[in-house]
Image: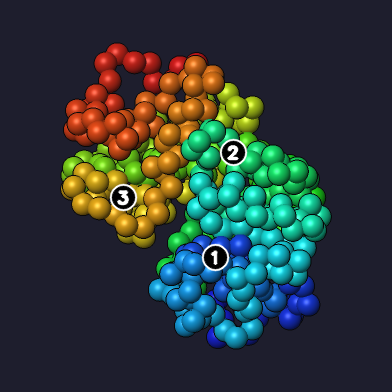
Amino acid sequence: MKKFDSRIPQEKPQSKENITILGCGRWGSFIAWYLNSMGYKVTVWGREKDNMVNSLFETRKNEYVTFPESIELTHNLSDAIEKSKIIVIAIGAQQVRNLMQSVSKVPSYKNKIFCLNMKGIEESTGKRLSQVMQEFKVKKKNIAVWVGPGHIQEFTKGVPSLMVIDSYNPELSAELINKFHSTLIKFYQGQDIIGTEIGAAAKNVMGIAAGMLDGTNQKVLKGPLMARGAYEVGRLIKAEGGKLISAFGLCHLGDYEATLFSEHSHNRKFGEMFMQHQNFTKLAEGASTSVALLKMAKRHKLKMPITQAVHDIIHKGEDPQKVLNKLLMPNNLKEFHN
């Protein structure tokens, strides 16, 4: 298998186009590495008072990638935004509003294309992240999301995957797919940004549930979890105005292997360690997303039993085994209901 990394010839000619990445955690740093390897000029912005950011800026490497000198690193947010037409945001979902408060002070930001590369729903409001962007006067036609299965540890070994880019504007989706596709990542064009955002966020909750099953030696129940989880999320997507079938696409069900089974999944590992009374120190978006999804579901008077179970165990301190037993051993329920 052909490996794709910064040491081999680029798949596309060197481009004069600059792309800015806001955020340099594991996904932000990978996207910077990936797009630079494809020939794009890349500017990476990170917060100055963040120890992880400062370490990356000083050494030009983290546990996942090493940055060549051709990647520009900056703490100047205004300069980073001014440099590029396309801005990829790759930070924690709960940080988007605070970031946009700063971005909105840059005069040219309304003319930019924003591609969101995170999987979460805003905990405080139950809003999708593209909705948060619109609150800051970003035009709907300029907002896209990039989600789907894949782990940096696999990508950097040259193991390919399929992902999805979705937006309110099909022409924008097609443009970004044309720019970003490679033999390492093949993109499908999403057709339901509501479903794509919700599905991508909700799979992290299912990942925590899967980790809880791992932590209690009930791995055999991951199959039922997958079936019931996709259906539960599909119903929420439909209630929010999206397409139920989106839950069975790359944004959600297609991401289950990477989230429910992989050793690299933060959410699965969080759930497993939680059941073993251990602390997981890395970001597990599903913990916040469980709160956000229930707020969303409440608007439609919709029950989400798996999401509710994860929420009650993590945030209410309810007995995990009792909650899981009640969830996984229902009494006389119809499998498919309205």
Local crowd at mark 1 within 10 Å, few (<14), some, or many (≥20)? some
Dot 3 or dot 2: first in sequence order is 2
Where does label 3 land, which residue? 270
Residue type pointed to by label 3: Phe
Dot 2 or dot 1: first in sequence order is 1
Marks 3/2: CA–CA distance? 23 Å
Q: Where is residue 154 in the image (x, y as percent from the top left)?
A: 44, 67
Q: Is residue 266 left or right of residue 116?
A: left
Local crowd at mark 3 within 10 Å, few (<14), some, or many (≥20)? many
Residue type pointed to by label 2: Arg
Local crowd at mark 2 within 10 Å, few (<14), some, or many (≥20)? many
Where does label 1 land, which residue? 47
Q: Label for residue 181?
A: none
Where does label 2 land, which residue? 128
* Residue in the picture at 43% in, 21% down: 303
Front in this rendered view, residue 269 or 192:
269
Marks 2 and 1: CB-CB under 8 Å? no
Q: Where is residue 5 in the image (x, y as percent from the top left)?
A: 54, 78
Residue type pointed to by label 1: Arg
Marks 3 and 2: CB-CB under 8 Å? no
* Residue in the picture at 64% in, 78% down: 72
